[in-house]
Image: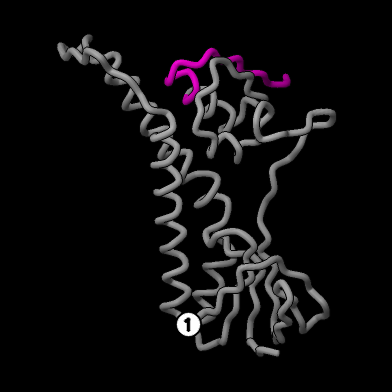
Amino acid sequence: MKRFDLVVIGAGPGGYVAAIRAAQLGMRVAVVERDKPGGVCVNWGCIPSKAILTSAILYEDMRNAEAYGIRCQGLSADYGAVIRRSRKVADRMSGGVAYLFKKNKIELFPASATVVSPTTVRAGEEELSAKNILVASGTAVRGLPGIEPDGQVILTSDDALAQETLPRSVIVLGGGAVGVESAYIYRAFGADVALVEME
């Protein structure tokens, strides 16, 4: 059984910052993460969505460039390429977090974690001994009763950030930051969009 001063469950902003700081202070640190390092923001939130949004704004600006005396004839967008670029941006940022782990001698276990006892964490099939355990497990997409995402027609926000085909029409449920941003992106690339929000 490997022994650590600190085992961090989750490699999002709470987990990776704590892990790096603990390692800098001399602790032997492990991080258990079932997805890529960086958490929701880096992999499935802020970073990829802003990469897509940047492309949408640029495309919309170019479509409206004639108002500024610039003609962009034959302009088209490759939505799949936009999504692939956003994934590359997210992967690069996640790789940066993994690099910081390596630089600070933090051992990363790519697995789901289970707290077995106050001093033991199971990372996949491996058990880790821990003087301290920090749970920084992050967020999950909240579902709606009676609506089951299938990754094809009914999408979560994570699904939408990976789907390379632009739908002809889309209903976005939720008028918060993610919903409004998603609606704008779909509309900028030419989809018919309905944005639905509770009162």
Q: Which residues are magenta?
A: 185-199
Frontmost residue, 101 versus 83:
83
Instruction: Label 1, secondary structure: give it.
Output: loop
The residue drawn where x is 70% and y is 87% is 131
The kind of residue on which mark 1 rests is Lys
Identify the colour scheme used.
one colour
The residue drawn where x is 43% and y is 71% is 100
Q: Residue 165, image x and y in percent?
A: 51, 28
Q: State yes or no: residue 25 in magenta.
A: no
Vertical position of residue 23 compared to residue 113: above or below = below
Vertical position of residue 179 compared to residue 39: above or below = above
The image quarter containing residue 171 is top right
Residue sitting farthest toward the left: 69
Tag 1 residue? 105
Q: Residues within 10 Å of mark 1 (few under 14, many from 20)?
A: some
Frontmost residue, 61 versus 160:
160
**Viewed as shown, does residue 26 lie left or right of 172?**
left
**Viewed as shown, does residue 159 lie left or right of 76?**
right
The residue drawn where x is 48% and y is 38% is 49
Q: Residue 85, image x and y in percent?
A: 39, 42
Q: Residue 22, image x and y in percent?
A: 54, 80
Vertical position of residue 63 compared to residue 185: above or below = above
Location of the C terminus (image quadrant): top right
